[in-house]
Image (cartoon, helix red, strand yellow):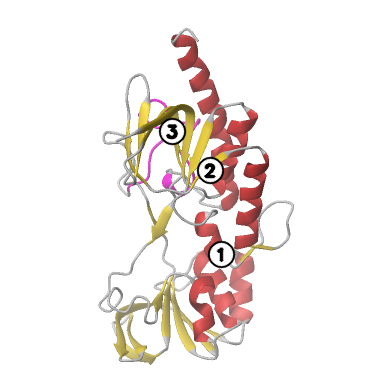
């Protein structure tokens, strides 16, 4: 295992929080590396339109992700396209291990690893993933032009993606387990006024069915009377929340019962010098703007932490 030069700060994850942290770290003159294993912007690239980023009335998720990346690059932030496979905390420094066997030492780490789509856990979901089951309307909506699709969920993501799919599909059904949406009122009004969208209240999916061509139907269950129905569909899009990507969180770091990392008001975890931001962190609202705010807070706190560590070394 080879080692590279010591860093002041390593940011793991290139979403809105990670890039914001990188920008503030550069402004604080920290020797920083941002490591992202996938496309810059993370889950932001799976968002069709963003209408709640302050100062911008409407922008595509991919364009906003590109703006984040360009802004960070303009500050000279070093960015690495690799997968991190481990974070080992230490008293003097922390070690970040990459998938190629290299390791980087650093004073501080910001974990901005976000989350992954939560699964329904029903028969057919895993088996038919990529054959009609999807967790990203922006990625796969094109393949369902003039077809029928079922969206599962009732939050902002489900409503946003349903509206996006309504531009492509012939008919969009929204299956929601309750009798009211959890998403914002503006989105609710748009969905309820969209002629191509039909809402199935108090409805859950019991099974996803398919033939040799892919998904062709779903079995639904009414949560009030238990009635079972078969609904013909060409695709199923699932938006029921996210699970935190917490596999890199060091052992012993405090997390809540759902796996979200517990931090203080500086976004610092119970492991000194390791910070958690964005969808990985326990908090009330998980939005692009709050992820960016976390990135700012964590970077400023990390700068203070690094300064303290260096002064302790007599540097």
Compared with 242, 127 (above or below) is below
Question: Position of 223 compared to 276: left or right?
Answer: left
Separation of disc 2 and disc 1 at Cα? 23 Å
Q: Name the residue under label 1.
A: 47
Q: Mark 2 points at which residue?
A: 79
Question: Mark 3 or 2, which is nearer the eye?
Answer: 2
Compared with 96, 114 (above or below) is below
Residue 45 painted magenta:
no
Residue displayed at 54% across by 28% down:
31
Q: Which of the marked residues, 2 or 1, is nearer the chain's N terminus?
A: 1
Q: Which of the marked residues, 3 or 2, is nearer the chain's N terminus?
A: 2
Q: Mark 3 points at which residue?
A: 109
Label 1, residues with CA under 10 Å away: few <14, some 14-19, many ≥20? many
Compared with 103, 215 (above or below) is below
Q: Which of 284 and 158 is in front in this view?
A: 158
Q: Position of residue 208 (x, y in %)?
A: 31, 82
Disc on res. 117: none
Mark 2 falls on what kind of element? strand
- Which segment is the magenta one? 259-280
Q: Which of the marked residues, 3 or 1, is nearer the chain's N terminus?
A: 1
Residue displayed at 48% across by 41% down:
277
């Amino acid at each position: 295992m080879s080692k590279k030069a010591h860093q002041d700060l390593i940011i793991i994850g290139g979403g809105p929080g990670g890039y914001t942290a990188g920008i503030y770290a550069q402004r604080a003159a920290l020797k920083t590396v941002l490591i992202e294993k996938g496309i810059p912007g993370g889950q932001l690239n799976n968002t069709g339109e963003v209408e709640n980023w302050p100062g911008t009335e409407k922008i595509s998720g991919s364009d906003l992700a590109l703006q984040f990346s360009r802004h960070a690059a303009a500050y000279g932030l070093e960015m690495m396209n690799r997968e991190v496979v481990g974070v080992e905390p230490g008293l003097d420094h922390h070690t970040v291990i990459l998938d190629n066997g290299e390791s980087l030492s650093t004073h501080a780490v910001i974990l901005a690893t976000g989350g992954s789509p939560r699964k329904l856990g029903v028969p057919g979901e895993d088996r038919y993933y990529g054959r009609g089951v999807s967790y990203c309307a922006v990625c796969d909506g094109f393949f369902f032009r003039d077809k029928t699709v079922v969206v599962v969920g009732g939050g902002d993501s489900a409503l946003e993606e349903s509206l996006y799919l309504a531009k492509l599909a012939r008919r969009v059904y929204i299956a929601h387990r309750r009798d009211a949406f959890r998403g914002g009122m503006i989105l609710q009004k748009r969905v309820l006024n969209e002629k191509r969208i039909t809402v199935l209240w108090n409805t859950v999916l019991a099974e996803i069915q398919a033939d040799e061509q892919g998904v062709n139907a779903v079995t639904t269950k009414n949560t009030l009377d238990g009635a079972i129905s078969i609904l013909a569909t060409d695709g199923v899009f699932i938006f029921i929340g996210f699970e935190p990507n917490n596999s890199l969180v060091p052992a012993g770091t405090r997390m809540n019962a759902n796996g979200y990392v517990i931090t203080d008001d500086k976004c610092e975890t119970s492991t000194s010098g390791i910070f958690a931001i964005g969808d990985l962190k326990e908090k009330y609202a998980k939005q692009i703007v709050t992820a960016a705010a976390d990135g700012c807070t964590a970077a400023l706190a990390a700068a203070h932490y690094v300064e303290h560590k260096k002064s302790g070394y007599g540097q």
